Image: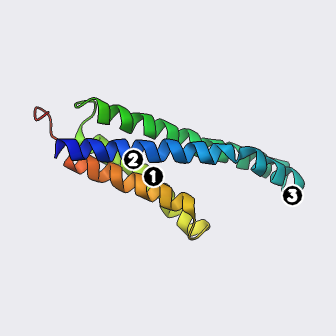
Amino acid sequence: MKLFSRLLLAFSAIVLVGGAYLHTSGFNRMSVAVAKSDLVPFVGKGLKVLWLQDSVIAIVLGIIFGTIAARGSAAPRWIIVVLGLIPVATAGFAYHFIGNFIGGHVFLTAGVAAILGGLLYPGRGQD
């Protein structure tokens, strides 16, 4: 189970970092759309922050999951599961506010893989 757990965590890391790359690459197009819109400047600037914040969180979680996958005892099982809830919750928000959307699928896939990887992760002293 140790290998399968690490593969799930590595998969989650790849999905999160890849998704963050694609998301960040759309920042300029979103910025142009915001500039052309009639949004209040505060809301437009807030949207830019939230856009990049989403990518940064995905990259940081990807690095954490990748590190745990590479190093057998980098974190306890419960930390991995709790961190896996972050992308799952993000997916829930995406589905609620946007609907059936690829970003939600990416976060849900990465989060479920991380949670399963955490649940299958060997306990302390079992590495």
**Regarding mark 3 in the picture, which secondary structure is present there?**
loop
Q: Residues within 10 Å of mark 3 (few under 14, many from 20)?
A: few
Q: Amino acid at mark 3?
A: Ser
**Neighbour tally class for label 1: few under 14, some 14-19, many 20 plus, Cα within 10 Å:** many
Q: Amino acid at mark 1?
A: Pro
Quarter where residue 123 is shown: top left
Which residue was labeled with disc 2?
Answer: 12
User: Which mark sits nearer the N-terminus, 1 or 3?
Assistant: 3
Instruction: Give the Cα separation between the discs numbered 1 and 3.
Output: 29 Å
Quadrant housing the C terminus: top left
* Spatial separation of the CA atoms under disc 1 and disc 2: 10 Å
Q: Are marks 1 and 2 in contact (CB under 8 Å)?
A: yes
Please give the name of the residue rendered at 88% of the width and 58% of the height, measured from the top-left corner: 38
Measure the alpha-carbon separation of dots 3 and 2. Answer: 35 Å
The reply to whether residue 83 is visible in this rendering is: no
124 with respect to 56 (left or right): left
Residue at image mark 1: 87
Residue 26 falls left or right of residue 92: right
Q: In this picture, is 122 found above or below 97?
A: above
Q: Label 2 neighbourhood size at 10 Å, few (<14), some (14-19), many (20+)?
A: many
- Name the residue beneath numbered marker 3: 37
Q: Nearer the viewer, mark 3 or mark 2?
A: 2
Q: Residue at x 23, y 31 (%)?
A: 72
| Res 1 seen here | yes
Between disc 1 and disc 2, the foreground one is 2
- The quarter of the picture where residue 76 lies is top left
- Residue pictured at 37% horizontal, 46% vertical: 11
- The residue at 56%/61% (across/down) is 102
What amino acid does circle 2 point to? Ser
